Image (cartoon, helix red, strand yellow):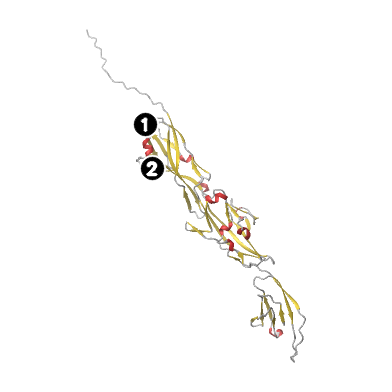
Amino acid sequence: MTISDIPVGAKLYIDNGTTITEVSITSGSVTINDYTNAVKNLYLVPAENYSGTVALKVSSTSTEIDGDISAPSPQLTLSVKVNGKADTISNDSLKVMTDNGKNYNYVTDEVTVDGTSTIAMSSLFANVSNINPYDNGSPTAEQVVYSVKGLPAGFDLSGAGVTFLGGSGTGRVWSVTLEALKDNTAQLKVPNNFAGDVNFTITGTTTETGSGNSASHGTKPVSILIKPDAADSKMNNPQIIATEDLWTTINFKTAFESNDTVNVANKASGYEALETIIISADFLLANDLLLQLDGTGVTLTAGQNITINASQKVEFKYDNDKLHSDNSIDIPFSYTYTDSTTLVDGSVINTTSPVINGQLVNITFQAVTDQPFITLSSTDNTINNSG
């Protein structure tokens, strides 16, 4: 039997019942002698990644016992349909970045993300331009699509090539095409002022364009760290009405405001808080002011700055040299604040602002009428009425 029009890259194997032997193919043709007796099964293995129909040409001759060989039979077409099978994805390793001794697939900071409120999904891969299906023929034999699941509430996916498939909460699912990754149109939308870690999963799938055969290739956990920035808050200048001669409490926390949240209940997404107040001892000494922290007087030393924890109770009043003074005064101070987030594993990341100068606390003292007193000295007012 003669088989011809065998495609380049295809192979034939003979199974004689005990062994399987590859048949040597020459110029796309092979002749198998004694086919009836020598061959129990004949196997065609198409070229790697081939799918479609192979049209083989087959003819045969017969040999009589006396050795007489017949003329070749007319060629027949033997059509072999090869169904496509989805292959793996090549070069889609995720990026690995280390921060605080932990591995993440992407690390950035809040101030960077706040600019656009997005992160490109391509940033998660080691080299997105190298991702391809193993069967990377032209025209494209296979399509690559990634499924994204497990995004926390407030996060979303958008862009050309991104399709929301349904679900709610962390059960929401999106599909993202390989083209959307390579073109940077697939974007992870991040809530405003978010800081912390984000964890979800991504699963790659290949689909044969011809046969429609599809295969998934393992779910990969993804972890992103967005570090806090301590860049969204400010201090207003406290305005205080005080009473002369009495200790006056300054609540600096009430003058602290932020575009970020200041609620510790939001620690999983980051919150900002006043950390320290810094006041010059020289200024207090020069203006006859006393300082008391948590009810204890502070010894003022010339040339030093006093760093006050924002949680302490801060009180001022004039000393004895200005006793009963109702002069208003502006006390200059500096401050720092922190941006903190608690990660999924319970660890905390803090970022502290630089020292910020130029603030004033204005104290207006209200005069108090003091209790008057009179001191009389004793004199001898005896009248002598004698003679």
How many residues crowd around disc 2 within 10 Å: few (fewer than 14), some, or many (20 or more)? some
Front one among 374 and 291 = 291
Question: How many callouts does the rendering have?
Answer: 2
Using the image, determine if residue 44 lies above or below residue 364.
below
Local secondary structure at mark 2? strand
Q: Which mark is residue 322?
A: 1
Q: Is 241 on the left or on the right of 140, as rendered?
A: left
**C-alpha separation, residue under disc 1 versus residue under disc 2:** 23 Å
Residue farthest to the bottom, as pictured: 66
Task: Residue 310: tell me if it is visible.
Answer: no
Residue farthest to the front, as pictured: 27
Foreground tag (1 vs 2):
2
Percent across and percent down for residue 305 are 38, 42
Front one among 173 and 346 = 173
Q: Which mark is residue 305?
A: 2
Front one among 153 and 278 = 278
Q: Is 37 on the left or on the right of 264, as rendered?
A: right
Residue type, mark 2 in image: Asn
Percent across and percent down for residue 337 are 46, 45
Within the image, what quadrant is residue 78 found in? bottom right
Figure quadrant of the C terminus: top left
Percent across and percent down for residue 26 are 67, 80
Within the image, what quadrant is residue 335 found in? top left
Local secondary structure at mark 1? helix
Figure quadrant of the N terminus: bottom right
Residue type, mark 1 in image: Lys
Q: Earlier in the sequence, mark 1 or mark 2?
A: 2
Query: Is disc 1 in contact with disc 2, using a CB cutoff of under 8 Å?
Result: no
Q: Which mark is residue 183?
A: none
Using the image, determine if residue 171 lies above or below residue 63.
above
